[in-house]
Image (cartoon, grey):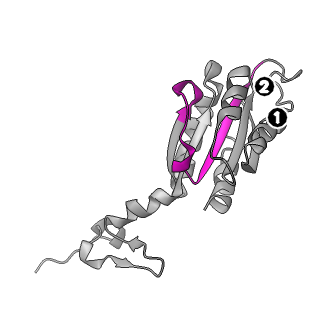
Amino acid sequence: MAVNCLPPYEQGVDPAFTKRGRSGRVFGGEGVLADLKSNRICIVYDGTKGYCQRFVRELAPLLEQRAFLVDTHSIEQGPLHTADYVGLIVGCPVLGLGMRHQAPGPKMTRYLSELSNLEGLPVGLFCVYATRAGGVLGRMRSLLGRNGAEVVVEQAIWRGAPGREAHVIPTECMVRMR
């Protein structure tokens, strides 16, 4: 008689052992993935000069470790259907010295003002700067606030070390976007 000596997490889940909790969610088996769709968030960013992509590559795995399904969406890809998500994370680069209202740029400003279905949607904000962040996060907060979004976290990221404080946004999202 063969004995399975693997630890439980490596043995896999037998579909016969799935069960439903009080909320009707399926635990174990294939129902786990269906349940996780309620934790879907999207990182929306401005791809100008590639500042944000580097941070998004570090941010997405940290969010996935916290049981989120993460989609990334560059504003160059067109409009976003926000009803599919429990929250958004929006980021833009700060070009120049971060002074004189240079960020967010005209493309991002137009994109944020055209986003719809944001009423009560939790949103995290980040900007990636080279010299200083300036007032970009405040301007992004006011643009999204006009559309009814609820900003739950803001963070300015230095372009030289984007991973240094990358844990802040995922931690706040874990608490405030469930």
Pointer 1: what residue? 139
Say above or below: 93 vs 21.
Answer: above
Which image quadrant is residue 112 in?
A: top right
Residue shown at 63% from the left, 30% from the top = 52
Residue shown at 76% from the left, 20% from the top = 95
Q: Is residue 25 left or right of residue 30?
A: right
Asked if residue 170 can be seen in this view, the reply is yes
Which image quadrant is residue 137 in?
A: top right
Picture coordinates of residue 29 (x, y %)? 31, 68
Which image quadrant is residue 129 in?
A: top right
Which portion, as a residue range, is magenta? 73-95
Picture coordinates of residue 168 (x, y %)? 70, 50
Q: Amino acid at mark 2?
A: Ala
Q: Quadrant of the C terminus?
A: bottom right
Asked if residue 161 can be seen in this view, the reply is no
Pointer 2: what residue? 103
The CA distance from mark 2 to mark 1 is 8 Å
Picture coordinates of residue 71 (x, y %)? 50, 42
Q: Is residue 106 left or right of residue 43?
A: right
Q: Which residue is situated farthest in the right direction here?
A: 100
